[in-house]
Amino acid sequence: STIEFTGTLHTTVVKQVRLKNPSNNILAYNAILVGRNAADFSLPKGSTVNILPMKRGFLNVEFTIRFLHPAEAVLILFSNKVDGVDGATVTFSLKSEVKNIEPVGMIRCKSPCYEL
């Protein structure tokens, strides 16, 4: 599935990935970001998540919109064995889109348009 980061230029957007553990064992995942613009995305609360049995776990993904062109990366969650149990590897496509541009400031200047 795809996680879309949309917002105003130069703002930071945080999305939360929700993982569900339907088993009776603890699941542990490590997350990595790969791809063309992976360096523009981050995992501010760390790259590991432990999910208790029959509970949900959350992983935050952060993106600061620095350029007008769309950014793309892939979030890969791979399981660590806990109690001999492996979870399935999960991947998400990360994409950004600039929806608005607001000026940081304005400068007024006076200058002649044409001079001989």
Image: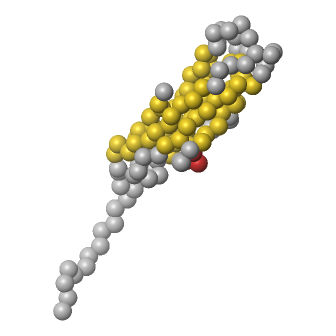
Q: Residue 3 at x, y = what percent?
A: 48, 32
Colouring of the image: secondary structure
Q: Which residue occupies the extreme bottom position in the image?
A: 116
Instruction: Count the labels in the image.
Output: 0
Q: Residue placed at 44% from the left, 53% from the top?
A: 67
Q: Is residue 5 left or right of residue 36?
A: left
- Looking at the image, residue 104 lies above or below residue 60: below
Q: Residue 25 at x, y = what percent?
A: 74, 11
Q: Residue placed at 59% from the left, 48% from the top?
A: 39
Residue closest to the eye, 11 or 55 = 55
Q: Quadrant of residue 92?
A: top right
Check the picture and name the quadrant holding the C terminus. Answer: bottom left
- Looking at the image, residue 45 lies above or below residue 72: above
Q: Residue placed at 19% from the left, 84% from the top?
A: 114
Q: Residue placed at 20% from the left, 88% from the top?
A: 115
Q: Note whether residue 86 is visible.
A: yes
Q: Residue 68 at x, y = what percent?
A: 40, 52
Q: Residue 17 at x, y = what percent?
A: 56, 26
Q: Is residue 8 left or right of residue 80?
A: left
- Looking at the image, residue 68 lies above or below residue 54: below
Residue closest to the eye, 45 or 88 = 88
Residue closest to the eye, 5 or 35 = 35
Q: Note whether residue 8 is visible.
A: no
